[in-house]
Image: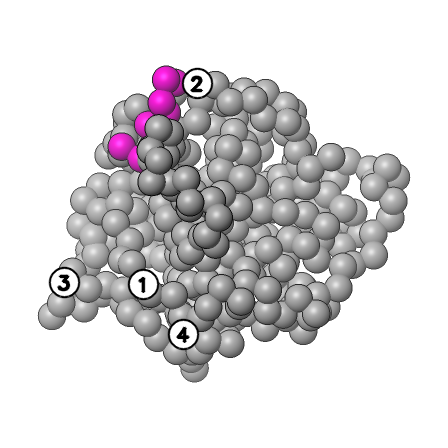
Amino acid sequence: MKAVFLSILGYSLLLAGCSQTSQPVFPNKKDDPTPALLTLGSLSTCKNYSGLPDQWRKNNHAGMVWVDSGTVNLGSNLAYPDEINFGEKKRQVAGFWIDQTEVTVAQFSSFVQATGYITDAERQKQAAVFLPDANHPQQWWKLKSGYTWQSPNGPQTEKAFPNEPVRFVTKNDAEHYAVWLGRDLPSEIEWEYAAKAGQTQDTPLHQAPMDHHQHPQANYWQGEFPFHNTKQDQFEGVAPVGCFAANNFQLYDTIGNVWEWTSSVYQGAHDQHMGDYQHLRQTNIPSQNFVIKGGSYLCADNYCARFRNSSRHPQEFDLATSHVGFRTIMRE
């Protein structure tokens, strides 16, 4: 489980910096040709990827893929209680465009260069950082300064690689980026529909994503968390986007690498609020916690174990961390 941190700033921070953003000028949507799909999915292709898809800032849908409308069985009955789908009901989802990969450092840098945007972590001068300490083996999260989307390993360290997923971004930061491109964050249902890509049954708890040769098929923690990572997946920390095979909808890294922001408020288990009168007033109170999806490079068999498309977790909207990024959607 992720440690819980107190919010750094008040809810008003969610709206901070709106004046910094200006949308790029694109051709008319109807005139946009369908963008070429990214052809990643291996160590060689992901490591050589620039982090910017073809036609970036020239095509509304650069780096995206169209997902047709359909239905999804939200959640899983084989894992944590908050993933259980009450009554196993299918949910209808309208079609939309979605990023093939998590938003990269290069893409976010393009946004910052165009708008002068300053992230919440840079304003707050604090972020939640994964720093395990052998003397305090169960305290691996610390609030630190100097950790930002540009310097995810701390001050005076190597800058973030352009082909890595951008991290140390809050929901507020992710929303500003999305608005700049005329996009949005996916809801939990939209995200899971795209991630499952027609899959009707998710993997059970503690069943790590492996192929039939027992090779990892996502970037997650192999070994005993938090001090021993065997790096069977070739990565000790975050990986460039698209190092593993895409799903049936041509999306990369929906499992592992970094958790991803959604626009959905976290209300506990999927249907916990049904029939519970104590949740009635919560809809009128600004929420602090939103759903993040997909697990991260810190998920291991002995900790987290949320390496499934159904996996979900609450995250404070104004807290930037080492292991949370995002991808965007565009609804027609």
**Between disc 3 and disc 4, whose residue precedes?**
4
Disc 4 to disc 1: CB gap under 8 Å: no
Q: Which residue is mark 3?
A: 137
Q: Is residue 113 visible?
A: no
Q: Which residue is mark 4?
A: 126
Residue appearing at x 37%, y 25% in the figure: 85
Q: Is 182 placed left or right of 72 in the picture? A: right
Q: CA distance from mark 2 to mark 1?
A: 34 Å
Q: Is residue 283 visible?
A: yes
SS for tag 3?
A: loop
Three-letter residue code for mark 2: Lys
**Between disc 4 and disc 1, whose residue precedes?**
1
Q: In front: mark 2 or mark 3?
A: 2
- Residue 164 within the segment the image draws in magenta: no
Residue appearing at x 35%, y 75% in the figure: 144
The x, y position of residue 4, in whole percent, is 29, 58
Residue situated in front as seen by the camera: 168 or 102: 168
Residue situated in front as seen by the camera: 13 or 202: 13
Numbered range of the magenta stretch: 81-89
Instruction: Look at the image and tell me in which quarter the C terminus lies.
Output: top right
Three-letter residue code for mark 3: Pro
Q: Is 71 placed left or right of 65 in the picture? A: left
Residue situated in front as seen by the camera: 109 or 174: 174
The x, y position of residue 226, in whole percent, is 21, 56
The x, y position of residue 112, in whole percent, is 65, 68
Residue appearing at x 77%, y 36% in the figure: 34
Q: CA distance from mark 4 to mark 2?
A: 41 Å
Picture disc at residue 89: 2
Q: Which residue is mark 1?
A: 5
The x, y position of residue 131, in whole percent, is 27, 67
